[in-house]
Amino acid sequence: MSEIPAHEAFSLGGDLPVNRIGYGAMRLADGPEPAPSATEAHIWHPPADRAGAIALLRRAAELGVDLFDTADAYALGANEELIADALHPYEGTVTIATKVGVVRPSPTEWVAHGHPAYLRQQTELALRRLRVERIGLLQLHRIDPEYPLADQIGALKQLRDEGKVRHLGLSEVGVDELRQASEITPIASVQNLYNLSTREHDPVVDYAAGHGIAFLPWFPFAAGSHAGPGSPLAEVAAEIGVTPAQASLAWLLRRSPTVIPIPGTSSIAHLEENVSALSITLTDDQFERLSRAV
């Protein structure tokens, strides 16, 4: 039985209800190498503890998490295979979101590649690795400036017209790019770096909210001095009796009704802590204090 309140859901694309805390599987692709920093993990090898990763993914589903985000670039497709091993045949309402449009020549390189034929090929490979006939949410990992946006979005639209994709999304885009893509085909989601202390995409959050588009903030936790001892985040967290990470997620959930954080972790304890953020309610004063802190 789901441990997420039934009302805490958003209808992705208007017809696909998902709970408003998802899971970002990127961190399950680090392998044994230490990450250079929180935002610079190599994401090159499958996890050293595969059994532990599978147990975590299954625990997420038990808790009611029903949106799992991955990409063909995470561990060169091994991340998608891991999700399939853990969750296939995706019983119930589990939705898998994956991304195409980035190549990985080495552990430290992420290169956008938007040739339409490449995007279609990578989607075909994702279908095989995920063991599905249709991907719930396919996102363009990055827009490639070497190819017209219309050609890249057109390739994804073709896949949807063929019944291989249910909904389409974008990643790391601004309002103008989101608007242009929406003129070609409906866009169900946008996935950008965004959290309490990283707010460059405030206009995208507002645009998405105004147009019923899901906003999936990756790396959703505040960092640095904004989350340290004595910070407004720490103070609000103490007032509520939760962790700063939980307060960060609660702020995101309050920030916009279409925001769906996708925190990633390799710890079941942290996973359970993240999911419980759905039950946290910030007062108007607490929300405004956090919003003004950055």
Image (tube, grey):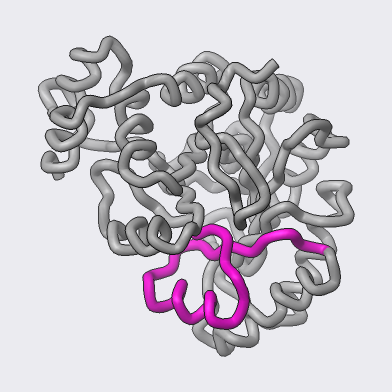
Q: Nearer the viewer, residue 56 or 92?
A: 92
Give above or below for 258 relative to 203.
Answer: above
> Horizontal placement of 130 versus 217: left or right?
right
Which residue sits at x=52%, y=14%? Answer: 269
Residue 116: image location, x then y, percent: 71, 81
Q: Nearer the viewer, residue 1 or 71?
A: 1
> Horizontal placement of 30 versus 166: left or right?
left
Residue 188: image location, x then y, percent: 57, 60
Give above or below for 141 relative to 273.
Answer: below
Q: In which quadrant will I find the C terminus?
A: top left
Residue 282 shows in the view: yes
Q: Which residues are magenta?
A: 164-190
> Horizontal placement of 27 versus 241: left or right?
right
Which residue sits at x=71%, y=75%? Answer: 157
Q: In which quadrant will I find the N terminus?
A: top right
Residue 113: image location, x then y, percent: 62, 75
Q: Nearer the viewer, residue 147 or 60?
A: 60
The question of residue 123 being in magenta is answered with no
Residue 195: image location, x then y, percent: 32, 44
